[in-house]
Amino acid sequence: MTTVKEDRLYAKTHEWVEVEGNVAAIGITDFAQDQLGDLVYAEAEPVDIDVEIDDLVGSVESVKMASDLYSPVAGKIIESNESIEDAPEQINEDAFGTWFVKIEMSDPSQLDGLMDAEAYKKFCEEESA
């Protein structure tokens, strides 16, 4: 069973967003890491980059496939989690505790376009069917 955290928002591309003030931490969901399998590579975009919705903010590779992480919000990357490059397995171990980037949002109203936990659970069930 895939874990879905109630305190996050979700994109259809399986990124989670944890909001604190005007900052959004972005990571991949438990569903995504489970689909990918054991991760062997992960990388986050560097700080001081301006991003728009759907811009690349990270990437992962597993023994099965590669996947990119896209920003669900616009703004500026203010933190980049470099530890994932040395230990991508931490994403498999704790997908919700491992963020890729933190973005200072330019328009927090964009969060309205994301799914809450209940909607994301249904979305995952439909994708798995």
Image (spheres, helix red, strand yellow):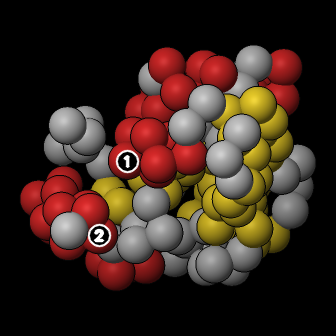
Q: Is residue 28 left or right of residue 103?
A: left
Measuring from the top left, give residue 6's x and y in whole percent: 18, 43
| Dot 2 and dot 1 residues touching (CB under 8 Å) | yes
Q: Please tell me how many numbered marks the rendered image carries.
A: 2
Label of residue 31 in the image? 1
Measuring from the top left, give residue 1's x and y in whole percent: 20, 37
Neighbours of disc 2 within 10 Å: few (<14), some (14-19), many (20+): few
Label 2 – label 1 distance at C-alpha? 10 Å
x 75%, y 68%: residue: 56
Label of residue 127 in the image? 2
For badge 1, the amino acid type reads Phe
Q: Is residue 80 left or right of residue 11?
A: right
Q: Earlier in the sequence, mark 2 or mark 1?
A: 1
For badge 2, the amino acid type reads Glu
Element on which disc 1 rests: helix
x 18%, y 62%: residue: 125
x 76%, y 31%: residue: 40
Measuring from the top left, give residue 89's x and y in whole percent: 65, 22
Neighbours of disc 1 within 10 Å: few (<14), some (14-19), many (20+): some
Comparing 33 with 71, the one in front is 33
Element on which disc 2 rests: helix
Q: Quadrant location of the C terminus?
A: bottom left
Q: Is residue 39 left or right of residue 12?
A: right
